[in-house]
Image (cartoon, helix red, strand yellow):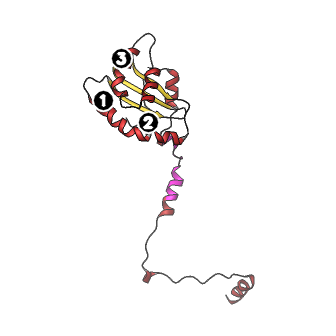
């Protein structure tokens, strides 16, 4: 799924039953951007390790993702089969091993079935297409016309028109001549 172009559609938890989608807050509230950038130091290697763990036949998780949104950092796990919370925590262990201790611990403690509040949070996410400025068809065709240029070889150029008068006296003199 391309998360930049569409918000994921996830199933909500059902009362008393098993669930296939679980989530957890990694941290809240959202820290300053500089602190989020510090996550880049471990995120690339964690992603590679998580992808390897997902390839195992015994892995119960079909996909996992960690998102930074307006509220903080949010982890979502989609399992291959419906599970109870305890089984989901055990099933996510292989994926969580890729994360630093603080993030892994926060997810382990906060893992829960996806509920309506989590669903509202996810639906509020912006995609690339939703943050692009809207363009009406007329202005886009006009802008295309304005940006079209052509090359005219120097030999075929027309002579420049005479310079327009700069003062009122020059304008009067040009009108009397013409």
Callout 3: SS: strand
Q: Quadrant of residue 62?
A: top left
Q: In this view, does 150 lie above or below 25?
A: below
Counting residues from the N terminus, which is met first, the one under dot 3 or under dot 2?
A: 2
Callout 1: SS: helix
Front in this rendered view, residue 90 or 121? 90
Which stretch did the figure color magenta?
Answer: 129-143
The residue pinned by badge 3 equals 82
Callout 2: SS: loop
Q: In whole angstroms, how far apart are the C-alphas of marks 1 and 3?
A: 17 Å
Is 142 included in the stretch rendered in magenta?
yes
The residue pinned by badge 1 equals 54
- Residue 169 appears in the picture as rendered: yes
Q: Position of residue 119 (x, y in %)?
A: 49, 25
Q: Which of marks 1 and 2 is in front?
A: 1
Is 90 included in the stretch rendered in magenta?
no
Counting residues from the N terminus, which is met first, the one under dot 1 or under dot 3?
A: 1
Q: In this view, does 159 lie above or below 128?
A: below
């Amino acid at each position: 799924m391309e998360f930049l172009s569409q918000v994921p559609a996830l199933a909500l938890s059902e009362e008393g039953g098993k669930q296939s989608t679980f989530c957890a807050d990694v941290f809240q509230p959202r820290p300053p951007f500089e602190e989020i950038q510090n996550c880049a130091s471990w995120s690339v290697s964690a992603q590679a390790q998580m992808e390897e763990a997902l390839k195992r036949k015994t892995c119960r998780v079909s996909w996992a993702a960690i998102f930074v949104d307006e509220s903080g950092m949010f982890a979502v796990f989609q399992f291959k089969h419906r599970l109870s919370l305890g089984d989901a925590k055990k099933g996510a262990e292989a994926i969580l091993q890729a994360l630093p201790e603080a993030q892994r611990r926060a997810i382990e403690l906060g893992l829960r079935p996806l509920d309506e509040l989590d669903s509202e949070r996810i639906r509020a996410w912006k995609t690339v297409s939703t943050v692009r400025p809207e363009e009406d068809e007329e202005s886009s065709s006009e802008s295309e016309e304005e940006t079209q240029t052509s090359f005219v070889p120097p030999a075929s150029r027309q002579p420049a028109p005479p310079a327009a008068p700069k003062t009122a006296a020059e304008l009067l003199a040009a009108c009397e001549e013409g």
